[in-house]
Image: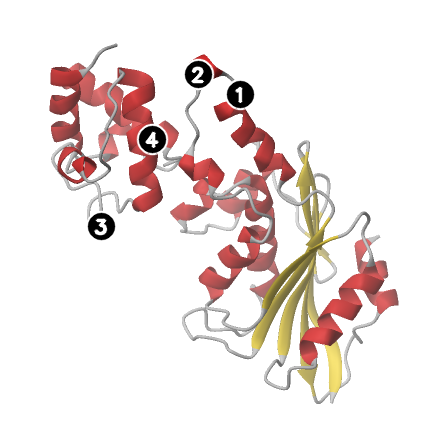
Amino acid sequence: MEALILELKKEIIEVLNLEELTPEDINEDAPLFVEGLGLDSIDALELIVLMEKNYGIKLNNAAEGRDIFKSVRIMAEYIAKNRTK
Amino acid sequence: MNINIASYCRLTNHKLEVNDIDIQIQKTEASSLNDIYRHLNLSYPKFFKMDNLSKAGFLASELLLKNIIIDKETPKKDMAIVLMNRSASLDNDRTYQTTIQYENNFFPSPSVFVYTLSNIVNGEIAIRNKIMGESSFYISENFSPEKIYSAVMNTFSDPNINQVICGWVDYEFNECDVLLLLIRKENQEKIPFNVNNIYHLYT
């Protein structure tokens, strides 16, 4: 799980252009939205694309993201259970 | 009342000039726009999410307003933005196209898509400085001081507008070509806003 969390942090930094952050700067248990990384609605859409492109997970309902994107750890746990690639 | 050029910024791949002062920036990254951002010690993480056109316009506006007494936090209903370029948002449109080019690798990027309009750069500058006046973006085949002058004077026909950020903001094929001017209605006579002076500052 820790390897997946690190991989995910790197991918999030890349796809969301968080150029001034390193994986160490991201607390895997901190909220991704509003607090924590302070991501916005476009970032949420980009994370949905990331899930499908890198892990083959298609979220049919954007509202599902609300629970899945609570933190990097929760995201990683969801990916570990549902990934198809 | 005089209409003056209160400040200007010229930004290209090879030149960065603000009010007659050349600024030298050491190039450390592939994108010199990121170098300028770091040189300015800005703390605005959204910068890195912008497309190149918005980055270029945003940085030029930061430099343009750097020495002007302007409170970024106060809403400015008397300030407008009038920009123009040749290539619209084609630079970013091409990047977006790469995300939808192939059926077996079809992942349209939302964060790239939101910049597939040239006037988004107006919005970035307006958000940063709380500019609430009219905002317009024009496409012109070539740099045209006459068109810029005409569009700005038309904007000043609204009596509520006292200052305009205007100019040419173009970015395509890694070529940055920006001239931003801050035009103000002022009592004193300074550098007059006219076609010749726009042309002079561009060349």
**Chain identity of mark 4:** A
In the structure shown, which secondary structural element does the residue marked by tag 2 occupy?
A: helix
Does the image show residue A22? no
User: Both on one chain, marks 4 and 1?
Assistant: no
- Judge the density around disc 1: few (<14), some (14-19), many (≥20) Cα neighbours within 10 Å: few
Contact, mark 1 vs mark 2 (Cβ under 8 Å): yes
Report which residue position mark 4 lands on: A13
The N terminus of chain B, quarter of image = bottom right
Amino acid beneath label 1: Gln
Of badges 4 and 3, the one in the foreground is 3
Mark 4 to mark 1 CA distance (whole Å): 24 Å
Q: Which residue is mark 1?
A: B101
- Circle 4: element type: helix
Q: Residue at x 49, y 43 (%)?
A: B50
Q: According to the image, label 2 marks what residue?
A: B105
| Residue beneath disc 3 | A34
Residue depth check, mark 3 versus mark 1: number of the one nearer the observer: 1
Q: Amino acid at mark 3?
A: Val
Mark 4 burial class by Cα count in 10 Å: few <14, some 14-19, many 20+: some
Q: Chain of mark 1?
A: B
